[in-house]
Image (tube, grey):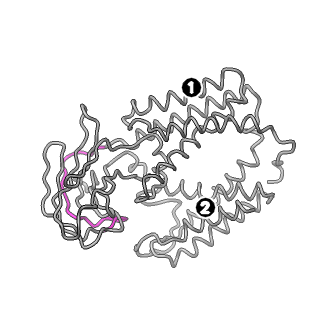
C-alpha cells in the first residue's frame, strides 16, 4: 500500500497546484479541449495508471480500484474550482478513471502478455523493438520545423495565452537571410514565465516562431506538427544566456535558422552563443508533458528513463524467447538509435540516451532471467 500512497501523493501534487493566473471558467463537459488537448488527455490517463497498478497488486478488488480512482478524480476536480489556473472538467474524470482501469487491466491480464511461450516471447520482443523505433521516428516527424504559407508579420512583446508578458522594451527587429535579430532593453527583473520578445505570425495569426526570455534563458518555439496534433511543444534554450544582462541593459538576441548545408539552430545573446540546438529521440515524452524551465540534468535523467521504458520489454522477452529472436529484436533497437536521427533530422543520440537504450535492454534481460511465471495469477472473474 505504500506504493499506492505514493501514487496518490503524486496525483495530488500535479493536480492541486496553481496553474497560473487564468480566470476560472467553471466546469467543462468536453472530453478534451484546448491547444494541448491530446497531450492533456494522455496526461490524465497516464497519471492514474500507477494508482490502478499499485492498488491491484496490494490485493484490492479491481472493481473497487476503478471506483476509488473515479472518486479521487472527482475530489480533485471539485477542489480545482478554487485553485487559480485550474479548470474542473468532466472529461478529466473520465480519462482519470480510464487510466485507473488500464492500470488494473495490466495487472489482471499479466499472465496473458507477460509470461508467454518462448516463440511468442521472441515475437513480442521484435514487436516491442519495432514500436520503440516507430515512437522515435514519430518524435522526429512531430518536431520538424513547419512553415505556414506566407506572408508573415512580427508582433513585439505579444500577450499570448499560457505565456508571460515581457516587462522590458523591444527597440528594433531586423531580419537578414536566415537570421532574426532583436535589440531590446531588459526588464526590471527576469520573467518567471516564458515571456515572448517577438512573435512571427502567419497571415491568419498562426504562430510561426516565438523568441522569448524565461528567467535567465533565451528560448525558441517554432511551428511544428506536434502543435497541430494538440501535443505539447518543448522549447529550445540558450541556458544562462541572459546572465550577463542586468535590469535596464540594452542587449541583442539573435536566432539563426538551419540550412540544408548546416542543419543547425543557433541562439545568441550578445557574445553568448549556442548552436546545434535541436531535439533527440529521447525527447518524445516532452510532447506529452513538458516541465518548462527545469534544469538540464533533470530533463536528461527523464530522457534516459524514457529510453529505458521504451526498450525494457525488448530485453525481458528477448531472454525468454526462442533462439535468435531476441538478438534480432535488440539489433532493431540499436539500428533505430543510430538511423532514426539520420532519417528525421533529429540531433545525434547523446551518450546518456544510449545508456538508457542499452541499459534498459540489460535490465529487461536480467528481469527475464530472474522472474518465472507466478504459481497463482489474479483471476479475470474477480473483475
> Is residue 112 toward the left or the right of residue 375 in the image?
left
- The Cα–Cα distance between marks 2 and 1, rounded to whole angstroms, is 40 Å
Residue 94's disc is 2
In the foreground, 342 or 89: 342
Question: Percent from the top left, x then y, of residue 234?
Answer: 40, 52
Residue under the point 59% across and 43% down = 309
Asked if residue 101 is positioned above or below residue 275 in the image, the reply reads below
Magenta stretch prevailing secondary structure = loop
- Front tag of 2 and 1: 1
- The verdict on residue 158 being magenta is yes
Q: Give the magenta-colored segment's residue range.
A: 146-164
Question: Percent from the top left, x then y, of residue 362?
Answer: 63, 35
In the rendered image, the residue lying farthest to the bottom is 82
Question: Percent from the top left, x then y, of residue 277?
Answer: 33, 44
Where is mark 1, residue-wise?
Answer: 331
Question: Percent from the top left, x then y, of residue 67?
Answer: 72, 64
Residue under the point 12% across and 60% down = 172
Q: Quadrant of the C terminus?
A: bottom right
Amino acid at each position: 500500500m505504500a506504493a499506492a500512497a505514493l501514487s496518490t501523493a503524486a496525483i495530488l501534487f500535479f493536480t492541486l497546484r496553481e496553474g497560473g493566473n487564468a480566470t476560472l471558467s467553471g466546469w467543462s463537459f468536453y472530453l478534451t479541449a484546448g491547444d494541448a488537448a491530446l497531450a492533456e488527455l494522455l496526461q490524465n490517463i497516464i497519471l492514474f495508471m500507477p494508482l490502478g497498478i499499485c492498488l491491484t497488486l496490494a490485493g484490492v478488488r479491481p472493481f473497487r480500484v476503478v471506483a476509488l480512482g473515479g472518486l479521487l478524480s472527482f475530489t480533485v476536480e471539485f477542489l480545482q474550482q478554487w485553485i487559480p489556473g485550474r479548470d474542473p472538467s468532466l472529461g478529466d474524470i473520465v480519462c482519470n478513471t480510464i487510466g485507473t482501469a488500464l492500470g488494473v487491466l495490466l495487472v489482471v491480464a499479466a499472465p496473458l502478455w507477460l509470461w508467454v511461450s518462448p516463440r511468442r516471447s521472441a515475437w513480442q520482443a521484435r514487436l516491442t523493438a519495432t514500436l520503440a523505433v516507430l515512437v522515435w521516428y514519430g518524435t522526429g516527424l512531430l518536431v520538424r520545423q513547419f512553415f505556414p504559407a506566407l506572408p508573415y508579420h512580427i508582433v513585439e512583446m505579444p500577450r499570448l495565452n499560457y505565456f508571460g508578458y515581457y516587462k522590458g522594451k523591444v527597440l528594433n527587429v531586423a531580419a537578414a537571410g536566415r537570421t532574426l535579430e532583436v535589440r531590446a532593453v531588459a526588464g526590471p527583473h527576469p520573467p518567471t514565465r516564458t515571456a515572448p520578445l517577438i512573435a512571427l505570425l502567419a497571415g491568419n495569426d498562426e504562430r510561426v516562431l516565438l523568441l522569448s526570455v524565461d528567467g535567465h534563458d533565451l528560448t525558441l518555439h517554432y511551428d511544428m506538427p506536434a502543435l497541430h496534433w494538440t501535443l505539447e511543444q518543448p522549447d529550445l534554450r540558450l541556458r544562462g544566456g541572459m546572465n550577463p544582462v542586468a535590469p535596464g541593459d540594452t542587449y541583442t538576441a539573435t536566432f539563426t535558422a538551419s540550412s540544408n548545408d548546416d542543419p543547425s539552430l543557433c541562439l545568441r545573446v550578445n557574445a553568448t552563443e549556442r548552436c546545434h540546438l535541436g531535439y533527440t529521440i529521447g525527447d518524445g515524452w516532452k510532447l506529452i508533458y513538458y516541465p518548462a524551465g527545469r534544469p538540464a540534468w533533470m530533463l536528461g535523467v527523464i530522457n534516459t528513463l524514457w529510453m529505458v521504458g521504451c526498450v525494457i520489454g525488448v530485453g525481458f522477452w528477448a531472454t525468454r524467447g526462442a533462439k535468435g529472436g531476441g538478438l534480432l529484436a535488440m539489433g532493431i533497437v540499436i539500428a533505430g538509435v543510430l538511423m532514426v536521427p539520420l532519417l528525421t533530422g533529429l540531433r545525434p543520440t547523446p551518450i546518456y540516451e544510449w545508456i538508457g537504450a542499452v541499459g534498459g535492454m540489460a535490465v529487461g534481460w536480467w528481469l527475464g532471467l530472474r522472474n518465472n511465471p507466478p504459481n497463482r495469477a489474479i483471476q479475470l472473474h474477480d473483475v
